[in-house]
Image (tube, grey):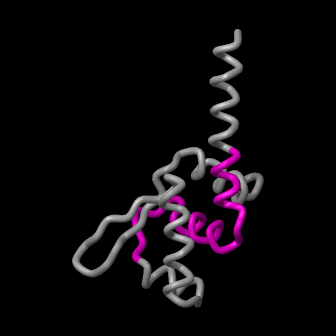
């Protein structure tokens, strides 16, 4: 029984860390924008949020380090996509209206 509790606590800890990373309006907006889409580059994200690229890059770095998104370099651009299924389910639950 102790092994189960330890595994359950580990799962809860990982999910709590993910929630901490998402608990910022800019990061939540970025992940919401990536949910259900294939990939977006920094310029597109910057245009949507109307914020400096340096600010967007800092938030993208936190999302990357948390394993929520991954980036793929194509030439000089980096394209990001949502890779964490729990984060995607959470975003869908937060932003899907009942009955849709």
Nearest to the observer: residue 100 or residue 31: 31
Vertical arrangement, residue 81 with respect to residue 83, above or below: below
Q: Residue furthest top?
A: 1
Q: Magenta stretch: give its range.
A: 16-41
Please state the horizontal and vertical placement of residue 74, each as a whole percent of the image: 25, 73
Is 58 in front, or is 40?
A: 58
Horizontally, residue 80 falls left or right of residue 99, namely: left
83 within the magenta span: no
Q: Residue at x 71, y 20 (%)?
A: 5
Q: Position of residue 90 (x, y in %)?
A: 66, 50
In the picture as drawn, the residue positioned furthest to the right comes out as: 98
Tell me the residue at 64%/59% (across/down).
21
- Position of residue 65 relative to residue 6, above or below, is below
The quadrant of the picture occupied by the C terminus is bottom right
Within the image, what quadrant is residue 91 found in? bottom right
Q: How many marks?
A: 0
Q: State which quarter of the image contains the N terminus.
A: top right
Point out residue 29 in the picture as x, y percentages from the top left corner: 63, 71
Measured along the vertical axis of the image, is residue 43 above or below residue 93?
below
Residue at the image point whose x is 52% and y is 55% from the top: 68
Q: Based on the picture, tell me whether residue 35 belongs to the magenta stretch.
A: yes
The answer to whether residue 45 is left or right of residue 41 is right
- Name which residue lies at 31% across and 79% down: 77
Q: Main secondary structure of the magenta part?
A: helix
Q: Position of residue 45 (x, y in %)?
A: 50, 79
Left or right of residue 77: residue 100: right
């Amino acid at each position: 029984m102790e092994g189960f509790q330890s595994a359950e606590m580990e799962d809860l800890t990982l999910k709590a860390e993910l929630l901490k990373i998402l608990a910022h309006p800019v990061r939540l907006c970025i992940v919401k924008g990536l949910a259900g889409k294939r990939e977006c580059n920094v310029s597109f994200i910057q245009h949507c949020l109307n914020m400096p690229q340096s600010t967007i890059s800092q938030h993208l770095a936190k999302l990357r380090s948390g394993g929520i998104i991954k980036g793929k370099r194509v030439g000089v651009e980096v394209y990001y996509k949502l890779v964490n299924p729990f984060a995607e389910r959470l975003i869908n639950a937060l932003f899907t209206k009942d009955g849709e």
